[in-house]
Amino acid sequence: MLTLILISLATASMTLTISKSKFFSWPRSLLPAPLAVLVRCHYCLGHWIAFMWSLGFHPLSLYKHHSAFEVFMLQWMATVAMASFMMGLILLVVPMRGDVDVAP
């Protein structure tokens, strides 16, 4: 459980750094429009970063009762959920100004 919390915190931190910080504003400006929307939306980007973490990390204790696919999906969505919560907390404490607000 502690590992999932740490991965979620890392996901939240990476997501906000890439999608909202001034440091990454120049790479975001170079992206084509469809990809730029995904990178500027911290919730959208969080899914992809959590996906990458889930590809590389699999807790062996979960394999006893579940298939590899079930473990992957469980970890991916749990990481997204926890990272979204942590992103909300981070944005409350450290307000960041994004380039574009993505609204449906």
Image (cartoon, rainbow, N blue to C red):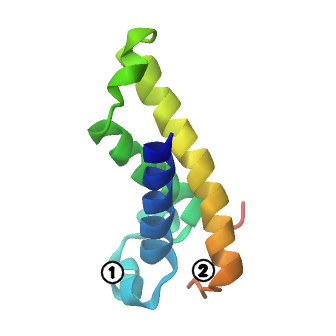
Quadrant of residue 6 in the image? bottom left
Residue at (51%, 50%) from the top-left corner? 5
**Which residue lies under the disc numbered 1?**
27
Q: Is there CB contact under 8 Å for labels 1 and 2?
A: no
Look at label 2 and name its amino acid: Val
Quarter in which the C terminus is drawn: bottom right
State the image coordinates of residue 26 (x, y, percent, origin top left). 35, 88
Q: Residues within 10 Å of mark 2 (few under 14, many from 20)?
A: few
Image check: 7 left or right of 103?
left
Label located before the other in sequence (1 or 2): 1
Residue topped by disc 2? 100
Q: The disc labelled 1 sits on which kind of residue?
A: Pro
Judged left or right of residue 17, residue 77 is: right
Identify the element where label 1 is drawn.
helix
Q: Residue at x 56, y 65 (%)?
A: 42
Which quadrant of the figure has residue 24?
A: bottom left
Q: Position of residue 31 (x, y in %)?
A: 36, 73
Circle 2 — which element?
loop
Q: Position of residue 68 (x, y in %)?
A: 36, 18
Q: Is residue 102 visible?
A: no
Report, in whole angstroms, how far the alpha carbon at label 1 lies from the one at label 2: 14 Å
